[in-house]
Image (tube, rainbow, N blue to C red):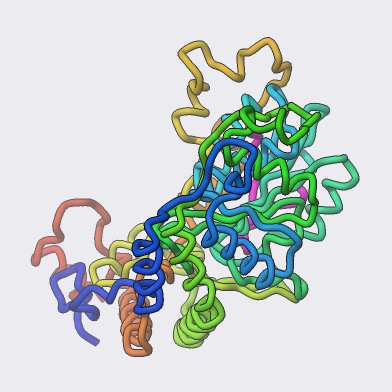
Amino acid sequence: MSDLAIFGGPAVIQQPFQRFNEIGAEEEAAVLSVLRSGVLSQFIGVWAPDFFGGPRVQQLERQWEKYFQTKHAVAVNSNTSGLMAALGAIGISPGDEVIVSPWTMSASATSILVWNAIPVFADIESNTFNLDPVSIEQRISPRTKAIVVSDIFGQAADLDAIMKIARKNGLKVIEDCAQAPGARYNNAFVGTIADIGVFSLNYHKHIHSGEGGVCVTNDTRLFERMQLIRNHAEAVVEAKGVADLDNMIGFNFRMTEIEAAIASEQLKKLDRIVVDRQNVAERLSAGLKGLRGLSLPFVRTGCTHVYYVFGMQIDSSETGIHKDQIWEALRAEGVPVSKRYVNVHLFPMYQKRVAYGTQGYPWTAPFYSGTVSYEHGTCPVAEDLNENGYLGLGLCVNRYSNHDVDLIIEAFRKVWINLAELRAIRFSSAPVSQKELQEVRQTP
């Protein structure tokens, strides 16, 4: 086996992998059709037929409903907008608390703050990286209104347990399933189990239209409220005869006809894209199996995983070396592996409690009477994984051929074979000298 690249040996992976791109002739034709029609968007912010958008937007919504087997779909201009519309639709009020994961895109939490409600972070499961139902239950207070569940990395959270907790406590549940389109939970599509599910069409998701999102629900009232919030609700409620005026604040969350046309073609490819991801993950799992101290992705019984991220864990007590050192060695071999995800509760916004203005709103507002904590140690599992255990390989970033996967496996095995050498070298940002390297190799 050749020397580790981090010590000057040749890297296993010499060229960056091909970037993932599923945009093809079908999307090009759909966009040209929209351009030639001259109608790039057909929304208007008054109560009229065009309040619901143009034909491409409405076509995508019906297509989404059919594919995901849900009653209603609302196309929006981003997953973030979708989360904001969903939270408004369920009736979030200033001072309410909403439980959310620390391991998620920041918008899962900031969409709560938009309504002057308070994010409360629960801890995650160590094997799936999803919200832990036990921690959720511990965070419920008299002010808790809802739970935002992120189906992280490509598989569902423990939705049976979470929905049971929610129903017992009179809470609404919103699934942020941006990373898990097409995943199933006990035969139901992820995103269709909670009160509202929100999908992403951002450029690095399984399917994308550059930007965009889709909300789904089986509740007709929530569906209509999301439509209103999407498109200047306050200008429409009188003509539409809406009596419930709470959260009927005007936003422009409208999707364009071009985005909708692209998304419609992308959705047709989702089944194949999911299978491709699963095949890559199976090949990786088979090739990396047996590496001491490396835990491969866990898939919950009765569920499927669509692998936005191939999430792994390092046990330093088994490897004898911190995961950051292994990460450095893998990166030197050309593996595009990450060593951190996020801990949103540790962001400056929450540590300093500065959101609206400079006086600590909404936490210091008279309408909030809680004492939520964002201190280090609030989510110990999430924090420890980030510092000591997590390694991830993004499967939605690159298009991995079998040969690419084999190179990744070869690089991992090369690092593991040389763990003793890696362990013996001091770990710092300074280059390892040839003298130091030679001394290590001569040590019995």
Quadrant assignment for the C terminus: bottom left
Which residue is the extreme one toward the left?
Answer: 434
Residue visible at 73% across and 55% down in the picture: 217
Residue 110 magenta? no
Instruction: Determine the residue positioned at 73% across, 69% down.
Output: 69
What secondary structure predominates along the stretch shown in magenta? loop
- Quarter of the N terminus within the rendering: bottom left
- Check the image and report above or below for 324 versus 136: below
In the rendered image, residue 134 lying in the magenta stretch gets the answer yes
Q: Position of residue 329 (x, y in %)?
A: 28, 67
Is 277 rendered above or below residue 149? below
Q: In the picture provided, is 188 more to the left or to the right than 227?
A: right
Which span is picked out in magenta?
118-135
The one of 165 and 322 positioned closer to us in this rendering: 165
Q: Is residue 322 left or right of residue 108?
A: left
Residue 350 visible to an observer of this rendering: yes
Q: In which quadrant of the rendered view does residue 143 lie?
A: top right
- Residue at 55 percent of width and 51 percent of height: 53
Give the image location of residue 191, x and y in percent.
Answer: 68, 60
Q: Is residue 377 left or right of residue 168?
A: left
x and y percentages locating residue 419 in the rendered image: 34, 73
Query: Residue at 32% of width from left, 75% of height from top?
Result: 415
Does residue 320 appear left or right of residue 432 in this picture?
Answer: right
Quick one: 56 or 255, which is closer to the camera? Answer: 56
At which x and y percent is residue 148?
67, 45
For residue 139, above or below residue 95:
below
